[in-house]
Amino acid sequence: MLGAGGQYEIALDIPVADDHLLGAPGEGLRIVGERLAVGRTLRCLRWLGQAHRAYALMLSRMTDRHTHGGPLADKQLLHAYVFDSHAEIAAARALTHAAVAALVDGRDTRVAVGTAKVVTARALHAVVDRAIQVYGAEGLTDDTPLPMLARTARTARILDGPDELHITTVARRLLAERH
C-alpha cells in the first residue's frame, strides 16, 4: 500500500466456543473501538515525529541553501512556511496529547482521537509538502527522506478511516452535545 507497511486485510470464519470468547458476547465492536482509539493515537504520535523531521529538513535547507545573494531563510515568502509549519505541528501536538490524556483517564475518546487524527494527518501532509517545495527537485528524489514522508503523509489522511469520516463523526457528536 502506498506509504504504509503492515497494512493487511484478513477474513476469518472460525466458530469460537462461548468459553473462548474475549469479553462478553456482543461487546466485540466496543473492544475493537477501544483498540482503534489506541492505534489511531499511536499513529498521531508517529506522524508528529515525521512532521518534525520534515520541518527540521526544511529549516536546514533554508539556512544552508543560498540563492540570489543570500540564504533561502532570508526570503520573506518562506517565513510563512516556517510559521505555518510550526503552528500546525503545535496544534497537532496539543490535540494528540489531549487524545492521549483521554485514553489514560478512561474518558470517551471519540472526539479527541478523531480530531487529533485529522489535524495531525493534515499537518504532516502540509509540512512535508512545504519541505519538498523548499528543496525543489531534490525533494522529489531519494536523496532525501521527503518522498517517503510524502507517501506516508498522503496515506495518513485515509488510514484508520478517511478524514471526511472523522470530520462527520466528530461534528455529529459535538452537535449532539448541544441538545
Image (cartoon, rainbow, N blue to C red):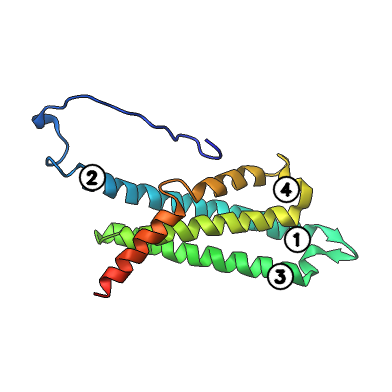
Q: In front here: 86 or 24?
A: 24
Q: Residue at x 35, y 59 (%)?
A: 169
Camera-nearest label, 3 or 2 = 2
Label 4: few (<14), some or many (≥20) within 10 Å?
many
- Which tag, 4 or 1, sits closer to the chain's start? 1
Mark linked to residue 79: 3
Q: Pick whichever of labels 3 and 1 is earlier in the sequence.
A: 1
3 vs 65, left or right, is left
Q: Distance between the residues labelled 4 and 3?
A: 19 Å
Residue matched to label 1: 62
Q: Do the residues labelled 4 and 3 touch (CB within 8 Å)?
A: no
Packing grade of label 3 (10 A; few <14, some 14-19, many >=20) is some
Element type at marker 3?
Answer: helix
- Of the numbered discs 1 and 2, the one sitting upstream in the chain is 2
In the rendered image, the quadrant that contains the C terminus is: bottom left
* Among numbered discs 4 and 3, the one appearing first in the sequence: 3
Residue at mark 4 to residue at mark 1: CA–CA distance: 13 Å
Badge number at residue 139 = 4
- Contact (Cβ within 8 Å) of mark 1 with mark 2: no
Q: What residue type is labelled 2?
A: Leu
- The 10 Å Cα crowd at callout 1, few under 14, some 14 to 19, many 20 or more, is many
